[in-house]
Image (cartoon, helix red, strand yellow):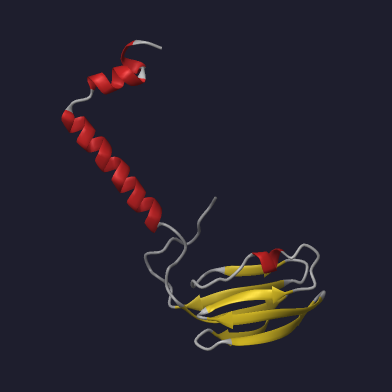
Amino acid sequence: MSGLWSARGILNAMTPADGVVAIGVLVLSGVVAASSGLPSSSPERALVSVGRVVVLTLPLERDAARTVSARLGRVRLEVADGSVRVVESGCPQQLCVRMGKKSRAGELIACVPNALVVRLEGAADPDAPDAVSR
């Protein structure tokens, strides 16, 4: 491709002011992308539900290990350093175990075969997005 629509043509047609605007847009895009993650507030507790029933509330300010009965058997949870994770589960694929530690208000750990959901709750960041899509 030749002429104005080639990369070289565009660069040749740019003025210094165009370059400043382009760099500013790139920097602003990076800042927006970095700041638009999941809610960033510290959660106060983890609510553990089996089906639609909350079976356990775990405060996150102190370390603990708890076991809950779910549909396929027992699920072992661990609270450490303000985060929660599933350490052991009787589900076949172990996706809930591989989800790792969660430490932000609004985050979830889900074990679908066990009908188990761990939801972190706390003071939500009012500027945080309601949802993030990938």
In this rendering, does residue 52 appear at all? no
**Which residue lies at the image location 59% right of the left edge and 85% below the top edge?**
58
Q: Quadrant of residue 73?
A: bottom right
Question: Which of the two residues, 124 or 67, is positioned nearer the viewer here?
Answer: 67
Rendered location of residue 96, percent (x, y): 68, 67
Question: Quick check: 96 left or right of 42?
Answer: right
| Residue occupying image coordinates x 43% and y 77% | 123
Percent of width and height locating residue 21: 23, 37
The quadrant the N terminus occupies is top left
Q: Residue at x 53, y 89 (%)?
A: 62
Rendered location of residue 6, percent (x, y) = 36, 17
Left or right side of 112 for 29: left
Q: Please name whichever residue, 112 or 63, is drawn nearer the observer in this view of the structure.
A: 63
Q: Where 34 sits versus 21, above or below? A: below
| Above or below, 25 relative to 97 | above
Q: Percent position (x, y) of residue 35?
A: 38, 58
Question: Residue at point 31% right, 15% down?
Answer: 4
